[in-house]
Amino acid sequence: MSDASRNRDADIGRILAAAAELTRQVRRMRSSPFAADGLSGRQVDALFVLARSGIGMTPSALAETLGVTAGAVTQLVDPLVERSLVERRAHPDDARSRLLTLTEDATGRIGDFEAAVRAHLADRFGALDDAALARLAEALERVAPLER
């Protein structure tokens, strides 16, 4: 293995370690917007995936993103609908399909949570100027694009 390959491997390892640490910090806070709802970790994951989706997702798209079966999505989503956190809506392009969307309440709670996380982690990113922070965000988005 060449020095360049070893350095590249080491850099990837450093990125993974830093990403894991940030993930741990966010996970420690993540259940807080829904702590009183008694949700499972997978249900909280589903809410955050739906929040990132923009216009909503079909149950099959949510299943694929979460790596579960369509039946498992139904079991995850039904309690979220019952708690008024998720709505099932008609799909605008396919009358046979439904879209899962967050309710206004869930959207607000996730927005408040994400603002709190950004504030909590702001010091960690303080060593980066605006241009460096933008480059980091762009590089990470290329490596791990958000699923929509």
Image (tube, rainbow, N blue to C red):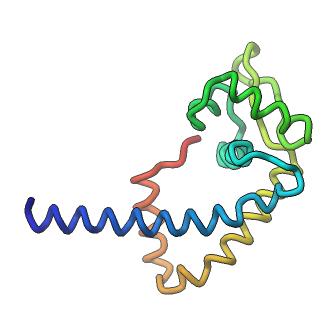
Residue extending furthest toward the top: 96
Q: Quadrant of the N terminus?
A: bottom left
Q: Is residue 121 left or right of residue 93?
A: left
On screen, residue 66 above or below 144: above
Which of the 4 image quarters holds residue 5? bottom left
Q: Position of residue 35 (x, y in %)?
A: 83, 57
- x 40%, y 62%: residue: 16
Position of 87 relative to 128 (above/below): above
Q: Is residue 35 above or below residue 127?
A: above
* Residue 11 x %, y %: 29, 68
Residue at horizontal 68 percent and vertical 70 percent from the top: 117
In this view, the residue in front, 127 or 10, is 10
Quadrant for the C terminus in the image: top right
In depth, the one of 103 and 25 nearer the eye is: 25
Q: Quick one: 84 or 68, which is closer to the camera? A: 68
The image shows residue 141 at horizontal and vertical percentages of 46, 55
Can you name the residue that lies furthest to the left here? 2
Residue in the picture at 74% in, 13% down = 96
Which residue is pictured at 73% across the width and 18% down the height? Answer: 97
Horizontal and vertical percent position of residue 120: 67, 77
- Label tally: 0
Q: Quadrant of residue 28?
A: bottom right
